[in-house]
Image (spheres, rainbow, N blue to C red):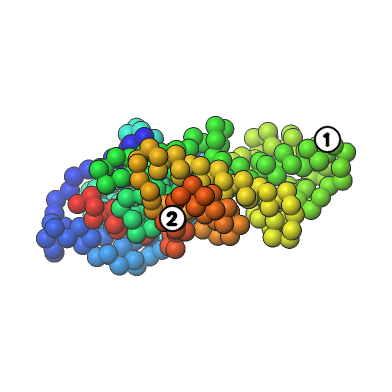
Amino acid sequence: MTNAENSSTTAPLPGGPASSPLRGVIIGLDIGGTKTHGVRFEDGVPVADESAGSSNVQNVSRDEAAANLADLFARIGGGQVSQAYAGSGGIDTADDAAALASLIQPHVPGARVTVVHDSRLLLAAGHASTGVAVIAGTGSAAWGRNADGGEARAGGWGYLLGDEGSGYWLGREAVRHSLRQMNRGLPADELTIALLRSCGVDDPNRLIALFHSPGTGRRFWAQQARLVVEAAAAGHPESQALLDQAGEDLAALALQVLGQLHIKGPVILGGGLGMHVAPLQESFRRNLMDAGVADIRVLDQEPVFGVLQLVAEQA
């Protein structure tokens, strides 16, 4: 699926030739399910780096998204900006891009605003112009591009339809594990005990109502993924198996995109889980290597820093 973009044309930047795309002020935004990461670049140099709550309207209301963007721009500054380049989950159509651009534009009047799917930031931040980017964060998705400009995508359908290997998926699977243990008449194990404590309930049966409660949602359950990671590190076999399955599912997304684009790599893994959970990374690498993929990378910088490469390519 082609990523959507929304942009407005501006005059050449003052003080430098039009062929210098990184001159002036560029705002980079990486909008995830939990937070919005913003960096202000001046002549290609980061001068402000801040985070606020999510401004992804799939996860929060439009009013909350607008308030979080206002909070972020109050700290990184807006005003005389030449370009704002945002990557966000849930950008599947031109209408999705335009809706988010309309929230950003008031903070950067007169600037060119571009909105793309957040996996594009990841590929650029991984120092690649072609290849496949895999996000493992609150949600999950894979996106890639080949040398002919062809694009393909796998996953990214949202938590009700997919998001395998994501934080939400791990949180949900922790609940399912606890309920299965209960139904089998088995005592609560370390993962269940940790989950009950985190959720503030005293019986696995109460997790059912809590899971379906409007008071909890995608972000809440994604945050419970840390319990699986911690239990796995302590030797809990079922948690270790969940991280192994997450890596396998994410590798499957990458392989699907590689096949569609007829390329061999690179494959770049990012997102909060992808960048920081070693057992998931190991499973991801192993499954890709078993399929003949050799160039596998874990992102070594935050995706928002891919904005400069994308702006240069756009120019």
Which structural element holds mark 1? helix
Left or right: residue 296 versus residue 9 is right
Q: Which percent across, then down, holds residue 24?
A: 22, 61
Residue at 66% x, 55% y is 229
Pointer 2 or 1: first along the chain:
1
Q: Which residue is mark 1?
A: 183
In the picture, residue 216 is in which quadrant?
top right
Q: Which of the 4 quarters of the picture holds residue 177?
A: top right
On the image, numbered disc 2 is attached to which residue?
Answer: 294
- Foreground residue, 113 or 233? 233
Any part of residue 97 in sight: no
Question: Which residue is found at the position 35% from the left and 45% from the top?
Answer: 263
Of residues 106 and 33, the one nearer the viewer is 33
200 on left or right of 30? right
Q: Is residue 148 left or right of residue 156?
A: left
* Quadrant in the picture for the N terminus: top left
Residue 53's x, y, as percent? 50, 51
Which SS class for mark 2? loop
